[in-house]
Amino acid sequence: MKKFLVIGNPIEHSLSPILHNYWIKKNGIDAVYEKQKLNEDQLGQLILQVKKKEINGINVTVPFKKAIIPFLDKLSIEAKSTQSVNTIYLEDNKVMGHNTDIVGFETSIKKSKYNFINKEVLILGAGGVVPSIIFALNQMKVSKIKISNRTKEKVENLKKLFENIEIIEWGEVPNFDVIINATSIGLKKEDNINLDFSLISKNKIFYDVIYNPKETNFLKTGQSLGNVTLNGKLMFIYQALSAFNIWHKFEPDVDENVIKLLD
Ligand code: ATR
């Protein structure tokens, strides 16, 4: 039986096992997908298990997406450009690191029938998933990427990877067509981002990477001010689908059950 894992710290709340095990079972694959909480000093040992084929694939989540890189043999262009790995597999006896958050984000927009060409995008936050979102936005040919983060040093570090981003002071709300919440504000239902959107005109897109809760206060505010809202559920599903495709060599269906599983 093949074994797959998602690693992170914390990891209890990860829904990756539910999704992957649903597809594994539905397609009659002899495999299991588990979650494991780790400390950074255990990463090297874990990668050895991939080399020995004791583990067939790993998803990596916060806070190890960058920390895992020194232990890998090879990175895809996407992983290298974002310094972020969320999917690991063995190819020609080399442990490979790839990033499927990028395609997950991009597919979530396409499936929602939006087009970001020439749009101005404001990203809130500079955490683990933001390099992937910037990479995807550049591929989608947006006209401008503005980023605002409470800790300015983190955006300044991002600017070393992506020269074209514009840094916005935390607290300021410049003009945008699309705004993306990539902070962890909203994971708790009562969380509120202290930003004033009341001067922004209508018909913008408010995107929250968070999908649980389904509707954060950020999205509620966006909607009440007359904007379109999207949560991160499709991004989560399509990053998982892309990892599944790498490991099992086919694309599983995104049927209604998949959508319901994550409610
Ligand atoms: P990490 O920073 O470890 O990658 P993350 O969950 O990916 O973790 O990112 C959390 C993001 O939410 C960060 O951008 C963080 O801002 P800081 O860099 O200043 O820490 C942001 N964040 C979390 N709580 C916040 C708050 N109360 N106000 C503003 N930003 C907050």
Image (cartoon, rainbow, N blue to C red):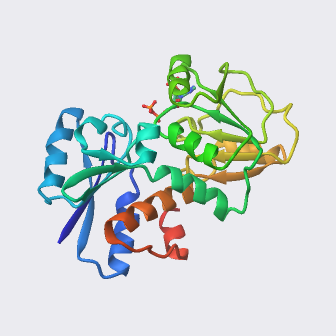
- Tell me if 190 is positioned left or right of 224 in this view: left
Question: Is residue 103 something that shows in the picture?
Answer: yes
Q: Going 57% across and 31% down the picture, which residue do you hit?
A: 125
Q: Going 49% across and 40% down the picture, which residue do you hit?
A: 129
Q: Estimate the x, y position of residue 119 in percent, counting from the top left.
A: 76, 44
Q: Going 29% across and 46% down the picture, which residue do you hit?
A: 74
**Residue 75 versus residue 238: which sits nearer the camera?**
75
Q: Estimate the x, y position of residue 166 in percent, counting from the top left.
A: 67, 25
Q: Quadrant of residue 89?
A: bottom left
Question: Is residue 189 something that shows in the picture?
Answer: no
**Residue 221 versus residue 76: which sits nearer the camera?**
76
**Residue 69 versus residue 38: which sits nearer the camera?**
69
Q: Estimate the x, y position of residue 158 in percent, counting from the top left.
A: 52, 27
Q: Going 33% across and 71% down the picture, which residue do you hit?
A: 248
Q: Report the number of discs.
A: 0
Q: Quadrant of residue 163?
A: top right
Residue 247, relative to residue 102: is it above or below? below
Q: Estimate the x, y position of residue 142 in percent, counting from the top left.
A: 71, 43
Residue 160, relative to residue 56: is it above or below? above
- Tell me if 67 is positioned left or right of 47 in this view: right
Q: Quadrant of the N terminus?
A: bottom left
- Tell me if 231 is positioned left or right of 120 in this view: left
Q: Quadrant of residue 80?
A: top left
